[in-house]
Image (cartoon, rainbow, N blue to C red):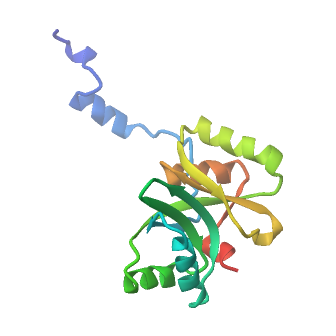
Amino acid sequence: MTYSRARQPFGSADARSFLMSVDLPQTTSKMEGPLVKQFSIFLPNKVGAMLDVVKLLHTHNTHVVALSISESTDSSIARIVVSDPEQVEELFHRHDVPFGVCAMVVVELREVATELAKLLAALLMAEVNVHFSYPLLTHPRGFAAIALHVDDTDCASSVLLGEGFRLLSQADISR
């Protein structure tokens, strides 16, 4: 198919230069929220394995503030959020604890019954997928909170802040 110069597709150089010269209004602004480190610890599936990790952290004045455990026949994965992630990373390296680290969005929920549905609806509208979530064991500022592992932390943070949610930082949950 041949196009005349006036009907070039948008991939042409003339069209690209036209699009670059147009002053388009900004439709959204990016609001970045705080992220919290989560550790995924690979443990043998045996009695007391998680207790050993908690004792190690406790002896160094670090606390687990959120916890989720998934098990299989031979092993388990403990996902934890801690009060001092830098110290925990150092401890795990020093004691040969196998682990991974990822970023989590932690959201304060003042009214769980209504805000959880609003939170999930906002993420759905933004097409942000929630891979897994779990509640915090502590209640920073006296309110419930949920840790979310999502496929796009920047988008999730921006959308949730835009909807009026309070995102918690590492400092908020470490108090």
Of the pair 145 and 40, the residue shown nearer to us: 40
Q: Position of residue 86 (x, y in %)?
A: 49, 81
Q: Residue at x 81, y 57 (%)?
A: 110
Q: Considering the image in quadrants, where does the N terminus appear? A: top left
Tell me how many marks there are.
0
Is 175 or 49 nearer to us in this picture? 49
Residue 99 is drawn in which quadrant? bottom left
Quadrant housing the C terminus: bottom right
Q: Quadrant of residue 6?
A: top left
Does residue 69 sit above or below 1 in this rendering? below
Q: Which residue is drawn at the image coordinates 56% and 67% (left, top)?
A: 80
Left or right of residue 115: residue 147: left
Can you give x and y, in whole percent of width and height, for residue 78 in the image? 52, 64
Q: Quadrant of residue 114?
A: top right
In this rendering, would 89 be left or right of 104? left
**Residue found at the very far left of the displayed protein:** 2
In the image, residue 2 sits, relative to residue 42, either above or below, namely above
Query: What residue appears at the point 45 percent right and 85 percent down from the top-left corner?
Result: 91
In the rendered view, tell whether residue 127 sits above or below residue 173: above
Task: State whether residue 134 is above or below residue 51.
Answer: above
